[in-house]
């Protein structure tokens, strides 16, 4: 440039300076972005779970696998489970003082939020009169009437202590009523751990990869037929070839991940069971009072003959129930010959918690809130997955949702098993470290509550974006 005439040399020098400045600015911007990303990663709060680890180590010497229910052990996601100390609203706090936005909700019951003050007050008021009577309790009538008023199929109801117990009673009832032994269930659907149902089951059986459970005699499942979910043709073939007492299903699958039925499937089951003289049973332990006040049967406009319930109707206390048409339910002892009993069934504390929970759910705007926050959560996470190049699908109905790490859609258990479970495990751990507690299995649905706020959802989506960007 110095060999050029004065003005030309000056212009060239200015141009070179501008290019150099632009390059410096570009490198500075790149450095800043890298620094910010590194800072973002570095400023994820340290996830100290030393006390949880200590307690769980002792628990493994006292209880099989260190837990009272298998899926809690985190075996499918790696690492060790955290030990909760307290819950409130949409949050859970562990023994190390870490707080999480909770999307498990004690596996569904905490639909109005954990430790809702009105529920706790009513339990305290009731507890002052005693914890269990072993005799008729007036609160049983109150909750029974609420259930009958809400659920289209239920004209009479029997309370139990768990969803498993409700399904055991239901199974004996449908066999007693029809005089038939065979039942038809769906692959990946879970109806508790009774022997007859542990055939191609979901929930912990799917989570742990167990084909069937040892200790179940072949004779116990010899009359259990299984079909793929959302496959009417396979159902009709089985009904045509066998004398089936009942077709039993999760009307929205939650124990193989979140899998909704097609409208054709759920309505077709009603037509086929009527045609072949089988009863239709909705296991609404998970969906009852969650996807609608009247459960899945209200949501889909399909009325089964018998319904099993649990979770929400106990407001966080142990409870279950089965109910249905009066002529069917009058088979149950002491009205009829089909025996089923329970020492703590209908205990006043569970009844009180259920009554208050259902009262809160009936208030204006409850299901609108559940639907809105859940859709916001699902759409935000799926958008982040798409942005960062992950194959991920998911959906929701009211306060129930789920994701699969696969292209989708997922219509049955076989398709659910195509998910990238290793990626899910990494996703779960990274979200946990950022204060988001998700079900520790690809094969479990998630739940929102009336306590989940827009701020909770936005924090969760922000955490998901951060994780998916690095996953």
Image (cartoon, rainbow, N blue to C red):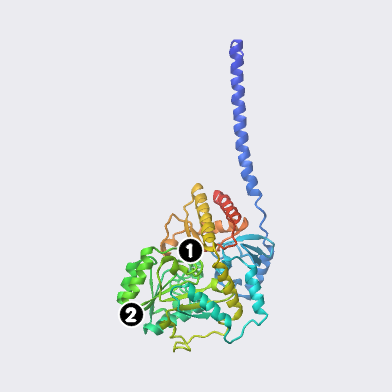
Percent coordinates x, y for residue 140 in the rendering = 55, 80
Decide which of tag 2 and tag 1 comes sooner along the chain.
Answer: 2
* Element at label 1: loop
Q: Could one spot residue 359 in this view of the protein?
A: yes
Tag shown at residue 257: 1
Instruction: Tell whether 276 sits left or right of 296.
Output: left
Front in this rendered view, residue 459 or 205: 459
**Left/right of residue 175 with respect to residue 112 in the rendered view:** left
- Residue 195: give x, y in percent of width and height: 46, 79
C-alpha distance separating marks 2 and 1: 31 Å
Query: Residue 45, relative to residue 130: is it above or below?
Result: above
Residue at 52% across, 52% down: 380
Question: Which residue lies most toward the front here?
Answer: 364
In the foreground, 204 or 113: 113
- Callout 2: few (<14), some (14-19), or many (20+) C-alpha neighbours within 10 Å? some
183 in relation to 382, above or below: below
Q: Position of residue 254 (x, y in %)?
A: 48, 66
- Badge 1: residue crowd in 10 Å (few <14, some 14–19, many ≥20): many
Is residue 68 in view from this perspective? no
Q: Position of residue 278 (x, y in %)?
A: 35, 77
**Element carrying mark 2:** loop
Question: What residue is shown with label 2?
Answer: 243
In the rendered image, the residue lying farthest to the top is 5
Contact, CB < 8 Å: mark 2 with mark 1?
no
Which quadrant is the N terminus positioned in? top right
- 49 vs 278: above or below: above
């Amino acid at each position: 440039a110095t060999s050029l005439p004065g003005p030309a040399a000056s212009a060239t020098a200015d141009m070179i300076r501008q290019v150099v400045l632009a390059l410096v600015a570009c490198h500075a911007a790149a450095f800043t972005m890298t620094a910010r990303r590194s800072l973002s990663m570095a400023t994820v709060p340290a996830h100290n779970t030393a006390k949880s680890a200590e307690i769980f180590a002792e628990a493994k010497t006292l209880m099989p696998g260190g837990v009272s229910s298998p899926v809690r052990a985190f075996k499918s996601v790696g690492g060790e489970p955290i030990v909760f100390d307290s819950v409130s609203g949409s949050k859970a706090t562990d023994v190390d003082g870490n707080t999480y936005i909770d999307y498990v909700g004690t596996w569904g019951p905490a639909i109005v939020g954990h430790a809702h003050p009105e529920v706790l007050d009513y339990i305290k008021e009731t507890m002052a009169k005693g914890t269990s009577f072993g005799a008729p309790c007036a609160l049983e009538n109150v909750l029974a009437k609420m259930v009958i008023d809400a659920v289209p199929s239920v004209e009479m109801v029997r309370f139990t202590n768990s969803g498993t117990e409700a399904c055991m009673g239901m199974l004996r009832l449908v066999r007693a009523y029809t005089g038939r032994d065979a039942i038809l269930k769906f692959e990946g659907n879970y109806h508790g751990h009774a022997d007859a149902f542990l055939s191609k089951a979901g929930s912990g059986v799917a989570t742990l990869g167990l084909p069937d459970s040892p200790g179940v005699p072949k004779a116990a499942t010899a009359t259990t037929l299984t079909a793929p979910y959302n496959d009417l043709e396979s159902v009709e073939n089985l009904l045509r070839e066998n004398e089936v007492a009942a077709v039993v299903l999760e009307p929205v699958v939650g124990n193989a991940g979140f899998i909704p039925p097609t409208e054709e499937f759920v309505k077709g089951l009603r037509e086929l069971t009527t045609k072949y003289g089988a009863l239709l049973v909705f296991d609404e332990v998970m969906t009852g009072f969650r996807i609608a006040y009247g459960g899945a049967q209200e949501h889909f406009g399909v009325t089964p003959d018998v319904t099993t319930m649990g979770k929400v109707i106990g407001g966080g206390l142990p409870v279950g129930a089965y109910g249905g048409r009066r002529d069917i339910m009058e088979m149950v002892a002491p009205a009829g010959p089909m025996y089923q009993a329970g020492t703590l069934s209908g205990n006043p504390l569970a009844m009180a918690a259920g009554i208050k929970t259902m009262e809160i759910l009936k208030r204006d705007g409850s299901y609108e809130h559940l639907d809105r926050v859940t859709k916001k959560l699902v759409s935000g996470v799926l958008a982040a997955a798409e942005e960062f190049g992950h194959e991920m699908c998911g959906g929701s109905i009211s306060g129930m949702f789920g994701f699969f790490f696969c292209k989708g859609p997922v219509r049955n258990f076989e398709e659910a098993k195509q998910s990238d479970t290793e990626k899910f495990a990494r996703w779960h751990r990274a979200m946990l470290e950022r204060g988001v507690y998700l079900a520790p299995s690809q094969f479990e649905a998630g739940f929102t509550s009336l306590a989940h706020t827009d701020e909770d959802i936005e924090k969760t989506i922000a955490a998901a974006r951060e994780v998916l960007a690095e996953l």
